Amino acid sequence: MKVVNPYTCDCQALVVTYELRRRGYDLMARPALMYQFDDTELSQGFAVMMHAPNLIWYDPIIKTPPDILPLESIDELALRCQLGERYHLMFDTPFSTHIINVERDQELGFMAYDPAGGSFAPAEVFFSRPLAPNLCYQDLISNLRYYRVDHCEIFPKLAELLTMRRQDLPDLRAFSPLKCWGD
């Protein structure tokens, strides 16, 4: 079993926390080790949310979650993303489904931020990172899809499942090591 950092296996919670921090909330993502619920209904709801991360958000005007839309390429999203807009970009890798934050900034342009890996760079640079000779990050991703979040509200009770106030951070040594899927 490989022991991993509990903040690198939970991209869904990390992108939600990042968006809420952008809105001024002093929150942290819950470490993945803390997702052990005694309530079966809560546990099932959490599992659905992890596979459909758009369900934590809702459009305040039409009261529905943002639609997850397919993309042909990162360039397609770069063309759609307007100044000040923020999106969650989902894609499949050979290992799992991953989700990151993307946005258009007036000074920096179209940017990608992966809170699980700490990478923040122009999207073109982010996705063309070399992983091995003749192989870059974008060669490993497929099934691109996205949804917009900057104009959405969040369901507070669902956000509490994924985030916590900074002062409530537990002593992670009290938890057993985490085994990520695929390890």
Image (spheres, rainbow, N blue to C red):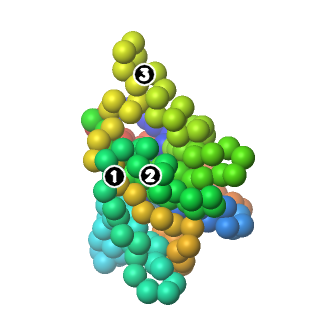
Please name the residue shown 31% across and 56% down the image.
Answer: 70
Q: Is 120 situated above or below 43?
A: above
For the residue carrying disc 1, how many other residues have a C-alpha within 10 Å: few (<14), some (14-19), or many (20+)? some
Residue bearing the label numbered 1:
71
Residue 44: x and y in percent read 29, 71
Q: Are marks 3 and 2 in contact (CB under 8 Å)?
A: no
Q: Is 115 situated above or below 23?
A: above
Q: Is 61 situated above or below 74?
A: below
Q: Amino acid at mark 2?
A: Leu
Residue bearing the label numbered 3:
131
Residue sitting nearer the eye, 68 or 75: 75
Asked whether residue 87 is in view, the answer is: yes
Residue 77 badge? 2
Q: Earlier in the sequence, mark 2 or mark 1?
A: 1
Q: Amino acid at mark 1?
A: Leu
Q: Which element carries disc 3, helix, strand or loop? A: strand
Q: CA distance from mark 3 to mark 2?
A: 23 Å
Q: Which element carries disc 1, helix, strand or loop? A: loop
Q: Are marks 3 and 1 in contact (CB under 8 Å)?
A: no
Residue 23: x and y in percent read 67, 67
Residue 2: x and y in percent read 38, 32
Point out the image quarter for the N terminus: top left
